[in-house]
Amino acid sequence: MAIFSVYVVNKAGGLIYQLDSYAPRAEAEKTFSYPLDLLLKLHDERVLVAFGQRDGIRVGHAVLAINGMDVNGKYTADGKEVLEYLGNSANYPVSIRFGRPRLTSNEKLMLASMFHSLFAIGSQLSPEQGSSGIEMLETDTFKLHCFQTLTGIKFVVLADPRQAGIDSLLRKIYEIYSDFALKNPFYSLEMPIRCELFDQNLKLALEVAEKAGTFGPGS
């Protein structure tokens, strides 16, 4: 079982906290000799495979790491352009890890805002007054769970469809938010959460949830 990520969205639809708690297995990692037998292109500040599917590498996969060092968009760990580095025969043989492109900070902000709007639409579409809005969205690879507080803060968890105890986890996260963010004298409401104790206790709660599947009463 796995919990993939946690989002906290304020009542205006702004993303104030996000944590990725699960690192998916690399789609493919392979050592290449020169010349590289894949066609790579730059798209949205990422280096993607444009042609040459093989050995688990798919068109659309991004270059995630070179020689075990994560890349930062179109740049290597030491600041060189990925395409320029891979175009130099002196750098071969080279190990490249490919996988699904990771979301950027701007993309996460945009998705949080979009979900906020969908949540409001879901409430308005309800045939009954007082709808809670979207509480769960299900796909074949993950479930999105949402808990909105009375003050409009949304706690969103993305998890494996088989993961149990998410409702209890959402309320546990709310409890951690109340104890370690709201009670922090340096935290301002509706602003990004940058509290070390909040981070530590949230990560601990996710570990407990993944291992136990659920929280018991009073936990």
Image (tube, rainbow, N blue to C red):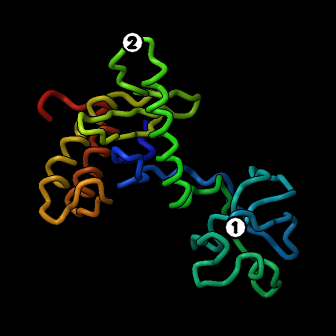
**Does residue 132 appear left or right of residue 41 in this picture?**
left
Residue 68 visible in image: no
Q: Quadrant of the C terminus?
A: top left
Percent of width and height locating residue 26 = 61, 54
Q: Position of residue 52 (x, y in %)?
A: 86, 56
Q: Which residue is mark 1?
A: 96
- The answer to the question of whether label 2 and label 1 lie on touching residues, with beta carbons closer than 8 A, is no
Pick the residue in front: 160 or 67. Answer: 160
Q: Who's the residue at 78% across and 59% down the image?
A: 49
Asked whether 142 or 145 is in front, the reply is 145
Q: Using the rendered image of the protein, determine whether residue 29 is visible from the camera's viewpoint.
A: yes
Q: Residue at x 24, y 57 (%)?
A: 200
Quadrant of the rendering where the N terminus is positioned: top left
Q: Nearer the viewer, residue 11 or 47?
A: 11
Q: Earlier in the sequence, mark 2 or mark 1?
A: 1
Question: At 17% from the left edge and 47% from the top edge, which residue is drawn?
Answer: 178
Residue 205 x %, y %: 26, 45
Quarter occupied by residue 215: top left
Return the x and y of residue 183 as percentages of the image width and height: 12, 54
**Residue found at the far bottom of this picture:** 90
Residue at 36 percent across and 28 percent down: it is 164
Instruction: Name the residue carrying label 2.
Output: 128
Q: Amino acid at mark 1?
A: Ile
Q: Which element is circle 1 on?
A: strand
Crowd tier of the residue under label 2, counting other residues whose Cα lies within 10 Å: few below 14, some 14–19, many 20 or above: few
Whether 61 is drawn above or below 167: the answer is: below
Which of discs 2 and 1 lies nearer the camera? The answer is 2
Query: Would you call the spot at circle 1 few (<14 residues within 10 Å), some (14-19), or many (20 or more)?
Result: some
Dot 2 amino acid type: Glu
Residue 139 or 89: which is nearer the viewer?
139
Residue 99 horizontal side relative to residue 119, left or right = right
